[in-house]
Image: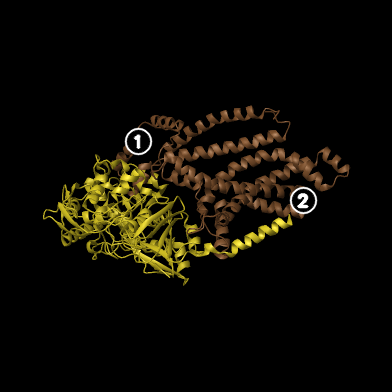
Amino acid sequence: MKQTIRTLLMGLAVLAGSTLWAETPPNVLVVGQIAEPQSLDPHAVTAVNDFRILVNIYDGLVRYQDGTLNVEPSLAESWTISDDGTQYTFDLREGVEFHDGTPFNAEAVVFNFERMLNEDHPYHDTGPFPLAFYFGQVAEVEALGEYRVRFTLSEPFAPFLSNLAYPTGLIISPSAVREHGEDVGRNPSGTGAYQFEEWEANSRVVVSRNDDYWDGAPDLEAVVFRPITDANTRVAEMLSGGIDMMVEVPPDNVATFASDDSFNIYEQAGPHLWFLILNLKEEPMNDKRVRQAVNYAINKKALVEDVLQGTATVATGPTPPAFGWAYNEDLEPYPYDPDKARELIQAAGADGAEVTFYVTEGGSGMLDPISMGTAIQADLAAVGLDVNIETYEWNTFLGRVNPGLEGKADMAEMAWMTNDPDTLPFLALRTEAWPENGGFNSGYYSNERVDELLNKARTSTDQAERARLYKEMQEIVYEDAPWAFIANWQQNAVATSNVQNFKLQPSFLLLLHDVSKQ
Amino acid sequence: MERQIWPYIGRRLVMTIPVLFGLTVIVFFIMALIPGDPATAILGSYATPENVAQLNAQLGLDKPLVQQYLTWLGNVVQGDFGRSYNQNREVIEIVGERFGATLILAGTALVLCSIFGLLVGIISAVYQYGWADKILTLIVLIGISTPAFWLGLLMIMLFAVQLRWLPASGMFAVYGGGDLPDLILHLILPASTLAFIATGVIARLTRASMLEVLRQDYIRTARAKGLNERRVIYRHAFKAALVSIVPVIGIQAGFVLGGAVYIETVFQWPGIGSMLVNAISTRDLLLVQGGVLVVAAAYVFFNLVADVVQVMLDPRVST
């Protein structure tokens, strides 16, 4: 017996001596992700978590310029847009190959979009493709030669290029789709800086350097994406050296990493807005004074500094500042002014009104919804609104909010991350976007001028003209206050000090092409 | 096997069929009752009523509920568990992958908690109200009343972050590794956390059964005959007490499988528990069905094994 125990202990000591796990391998970057990816088929997925891997395996025709949301060439070297804004003709980069060795050309581009959009395409059944509506205006995609492709839109649609730069526009190898069918999401092949190696379920996705990458081979030999769903475990792995980088650091842990020289914290404002939808159909929020009062009453600075511990900034209006060119810099956030809020509420005769407030337990981009909801409840109570919170799990919450708040609630939390200044207001502020018409305007805001501006901005291909239209829209919406504008999230990441040349992008995508590790 | 053990096992196995069938009905309709649906979960912020309806139609979720269930059942009988909506893979493939990992974790934990539970129980009973009993009882009570996920996090903070002796999470090293020592290293923290929690019940029960047996006349007789104490405790008392302990170990097997849900989430163990948590929150109905069916079948199986062992140990239990 004693002999056995001694042998066992010695075995353990040997194991403990070989501290393999305490260090990640040299020149291999290990990234702690928030969840297991659903699929690595760029047309089949919707989650930012999956996009973070995809953009390293695939390229699109265009991409976002480093550090901005402006579009620049990628697999397409150049393009022309017809005067009426309905025809986009792209000249493609020559000599690019997919990781499986097949050539990238106009036929491949046509295959990608036909598969997603044409129900009669032989590989349309390898879907579903939930974000295909990003390209809903595409009427036809034709190859005009080996390296020229033309998209014809049913109507002018200004966000088209920006949508092409979004992960839904990434180009997958047609032969991989033909070979693997609906399992192509686990056997991905793109043209990107890294090629897919293996995916071990719930354990890791490994990608390795593409030595032939058209934009220069990356430094790193490989990148390993590890899904670690529990935020505390993710932090523990970072502290114990099991991963080199983690995304979405909980606000409570940012300080821990900041005070330690062996870690670097990265922050970047993104096109995110956290807001309250107000129900304009019913009392008391049908009165503009009450809606403005809500905006004045909420101490947004305290929310972002105390609850979110500086991981967000105070929002001004419906358009996040990350959309530099379309953002109206003349507007200032509603100041925290409880006295003014109280006056407005009394003037509207809404003092003591009962308000039902939908709060979610958590969800994509929702930050810390329960604590934020409670703080908002207290702020509103202080100015004379009697707020009752109803809390729902995320999917239930969406199932109640998206069909419209009428008869159910007066306010609801919501957050959006988008890639174009068009998306959120177009889907959630127009009269035609009321829930019964299939939109997200769950609070029933309606302003003819806003409708007109948004419809116009969508069809103009002149960026300066679009900017002017969006800025006017922001002024009106700010004044009408159909929402309470609360916060713009700053996404964050932590990496060990060995990781070099890393940058977060306003697009929320995790580009690892230039990253190296000492 | 003069006691007709095989017909008994056969009867028990037949009885599991209605149990599993009833279970699938309940799970199916509970999943339908929770608000939200797979399409909303997949689409997230983009879940307009229109998009949801379209995706539901693609997923075959626009059919009446009973018809959906019968279709599912018909397919299962033919060995087709369907595809996960969310991962777009065969359910059977996912469940198969995950269940192996859970068995390794839960099996190790069960062995550990049985060994320690029995040892602690015996020591506590033999030295009833002595200091050893008091200390062990205290530790065991802490184990019973500690939330599994919290203990797991503490273990990670101590052994992975502070001491750096053991990896914080996962089943294998991320790069390289993949062999048995690597697995054992990753297994130590989650398995011992799970075992610590489950040890308590077995220990308390062993103690109670042992105390009961130790008061029996034949033990006094054995002692009176001058047998050495060790022999009295292990050969005479323990063997008799084991009869009432074995079914509890069977139940603990189920508990360990259930507890694995938390432990797997905290330690990022790629097992069926963490898969179920994720599948439920994304309303991935077929995956939930498949996973629950396998867990339930395992639970039933462990109970059966425990009952069979009990039958073989105890001549009084009738088949």
**Closer to the camera, A12 or A307?**
A12
The picture places residue A408, in percent across and down from the top left corner, at 35, 43
Q: Between marks 2 and 1, how big is the CA–CA gap? A: 63 Å
> Please, what is the three-letter code of the amino acid marked with disc 1?
Gly
Looking at the rendered image, the disc whose residue lies closer to the viewer, 2 or 1, is: 1
Which of the numbered marks, if any, corresponds to residue A164?
A: none
* Chain letter of the residue carrying label 1: B
x, y (%) of residue A147?
19, 55
Count all numbered tags in the image, as a single digit: 2
- Is residue A190 something one can see in this rendering? yes
Q: Secondary structure at mark 1?
A: loop
Q: Which residue is mark 2?
A: B129
Q: Quadrant of the N terminus of chain B?
A: top right
Of callouts 2 and 1, the N-terminal one: 1
Q: Position of residue B216 (x, y in %)?
A: 81, 38
Relative depth, front residue between B103 and B2: B2
Q: Position of residue B155 (x, y in %)?
A: 58, 58
Amino acid identity at mark 2: Tyr
Q: Could you say which chain is coloured yellow in the image? A: A
Q: Nearer the viewer, residue B187 or A314?
A: B187
The colour chain B appears in is brown
In the image, farthest residue toward the front? A101
